[in-house]
Image (cartoon, rainbow, N blue to C red):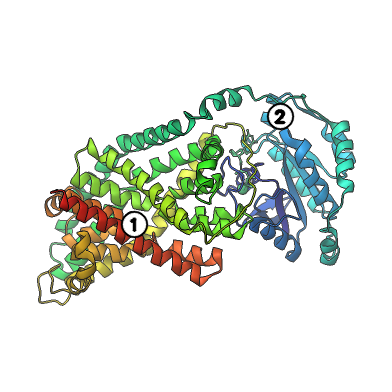
Amino acid sequence: MKRIALLGMPNTGKSTLFNRLTGASARVGNWPGITVDLMSAKILLGGHIAELVDLPGIYDLHGFSDDEQVVRHFIENNEIDLVMLVLNACQLDRQLSLGLQVRDLGLPTVLMLNMADEARHNAIAIDTETMSAQLDMPVMLVSAKYGEGCQQALQVTAGRLNRTAHPAPENLRAQLSSDDRIEREMEAIMQASVQMPLHLTDALSARIDRVVLHPWLGLPMFFAALFLLFQFIFTVGKPLQDGVAWILGYVRGGLLEPWLAGAPPWLHGLLLDGIYNGVGTVVAFVPLIVLFFLVMTMVEDSGYLSRAAFLTDSLMAKMGLDGRGFVMLLMGFGCNVPALMGTRVMRSRPLRLLTMLVIPFSLCSARLQVFVFMAAALFTSQQAPLVLFALYLMSFAATFVTALLFKSKFVSSEPFLLELPPYRLPTPRQIFLRGWQEVSHFLRRATKFIIAGVVLVWALTNYPNDVPPASAYTLAGMIGTALSPVLTPIGIDGKLAIALIFGFVAKEIVIGSLAVIYGLSGDSLVHLIGQRLDWVQGMSFMLFTLIYTPCLSTIATMRSESRSNAFMWLSIVWSLLLAWMVCFVFYQGARALGY
Ligand SMILES: Nc1nc2c(ncn2[C@@H]2O[C@H](COP(=O)(O)OP(=O)(O)OP(=O)(O)O)[C@@H](O)[C@H]2O)c(=O)[nH]1
Ligand SMILES: [Mg+2]
């Protein structure tokens, strides 16, 4: 099988092209450094099956950051039959150097000048034939986002692929050493085949930036925008969620109950109170998750992330981090795992570690479910969105405290150059791809963790057999009692403790566990929790959930990305400690004030 590698600078649309050509759904975003790992898919090319590999973006074949090393390692250790080189047609003056470096590798290459639509818009004229002759490789002008030129590009690629013989890897390694002829040659090619206006003016982006990047209004506006987005998600998402919960309740009452009426009580309990309640409670959040990721896709693709990095860079620098760290925190709102991997773009190891240490405090979508649920149980519908927003602010606060405390241990001075990409609107196709990918991820986790977790919780709260379910005499009750010296001072009872223990595996299980522990789901569970807990206990539970270790996948990623067990343990122990301290201060403080 032939192998084709997609190579190019960050944010040039490699993953978009990859998705376009393979029908896959690699993650795309208007931020340099979205792809940090290899992703491959097979396509049919000229009658043969070929493997297309999407690589992280690199500025230079000789760079030092972790993702540049991933690419170099890949080139050195794999047989590549063809390089599909992707450059941004609007930035050839800067990007062509990578093209020349790649050509010098001696691998068969086709050059895709992507973003043809933006180039046209910016009145950039490119003579692809001349450039092709100068570079001695096919040059195609394409727009991966809108599909323009992609079919033709595939044909050219297929043609090129059929007459390749690849060079020996030793030659390749030799070629990877640098060469400064490139500079002069690049100028010659630009002269002959590219016409660019002297000043590239993206008038719209510039106009938006004048407002968005305002010296002192920029940051407040940024937080106001976040607030509005979340307000939007809940206003639209809550009724949808209630709708799904209603349907699930209806199915249970109208269909499953009669159907299982003759079953033995333990089977009835396990299936309905265990699996159905637990999983159903989680599934009710699917509409909210979809909506959340639709909004995330918009934000990520708009280019606003780079502005966020710009706005917060100096603030973050005071904490030993930089603007990129802030962007990773925002990405962590979706899921902490890709955010942790996104730190690969940082070259300095201390900076990278410090950023990785704070990312788990970023309030991910799994924790969001827990908070939406608890807030609905304990606060009015006017208060609930404010409580949620306060939790987001709290997540930043935990980050800041941690960074300030640890920055002297992780000192770095990596200069950070930020490129502001133009504002872009995602196409419906991109939104759909991303939305679908996130929902299937959510459902995969649901089947992997939630069913097993829920069954285990059900067993713990129902055994031994001869005691009342969920009482202090069950296994779960005993665990709760054992932990009470630590958890009572922060207002967390035995039942909540069980939910927290399972939450260590994945936060998606927390609400499902509560459903099983209380033997209720949907509205009745919300009501019961509203009666059993007061808002101070509920808030303490939410704070603990926010701050302690997010999930096993995060821990595993921490370990693999830092390649250090000590670092992983530091993160686990510190977050548990911080969670406990914050809850202790909050809970005792609130009680002392008479709440
Ligand atoms: N206007 C326009 N935008 C595009 C085109 N192709 C990609 N984009 C946008 O460019 C941005 C970057 O796309 P990605 O596919 O994530 O780029 P990448 O090269 O994989 O980036 P890294 O993984 O960070 O190296 C996204 O906002 C895309 O929607 C195009 O042909 N035209
Ligand atoms: Mg990519």
- Mark 2 or mark 1, which has the lower sequence index? 2
Residue at screen point 67% across, 54% down:
52
Q: Residue at x 69, y 39 (%)?
A: 150
Q: Which mark is residue 498?
A: none
Q: Using the rendered image of the protein, determine whether residue 544 is visible from the camera's viewpoint.
A: yes
Alpha-carbon distance for marks 2 and 1?
Answer: 44 Å
**Residue situated in front as seen by the camera: 214 or 121:** 214
Q: Residue furthest front?
A: 408
**Is the residue under label 1 in contact with that under label 2 (CB below 8 Å)?**
no
Q: Residue at x 57, y 56 (%)?
A: 351
Q: Is residue 59 left or right of residue 495?
A: right
Question: Picture coordinates of residue 281 (x, y %)?
Answer: 26, 53
Spot occupied by residue 306 in the image (x, y as percentages of width and height): 56, 39
In-image side of 405 versus 351 (left or right): left
Count neighbours of disc 2 (C-alpha within 10 A) and say few if under 14, some if 14 to 19, many if 20 or more: many
Element under disc 2: helix
Q: Which residue occupies the foreground of this view, 237 or 243?
A: 237
Q: Residue 75: x, y in percent? A: 74, 60
Q: Which residue is mark 1?
A: 508
Query: Secondary structure under badge 1?
Result: helix
| The one of 441 and 201 positioned closer to us in this rendering | 201
Sort mark 1 into few (<14), some (14-19) or many (20+) by Cα contacts within 10 Å. Answer: many
Q: Amino acid at mark 1?
A: Glu
In the displayed structure, 472 sits above or below 506; it is below
Residue 95 lies in what quarter of the image? Answer: top right
Spot occupied by residue 179 in the image (x, y as percentages of width and height): 86, 52
| Vertical position of residue 278 compared to residue 333: above or below | below
**Left or right of residue 304: residue 390:** left
- Label disc, if present, on residue 119 of the rendered structure: 2
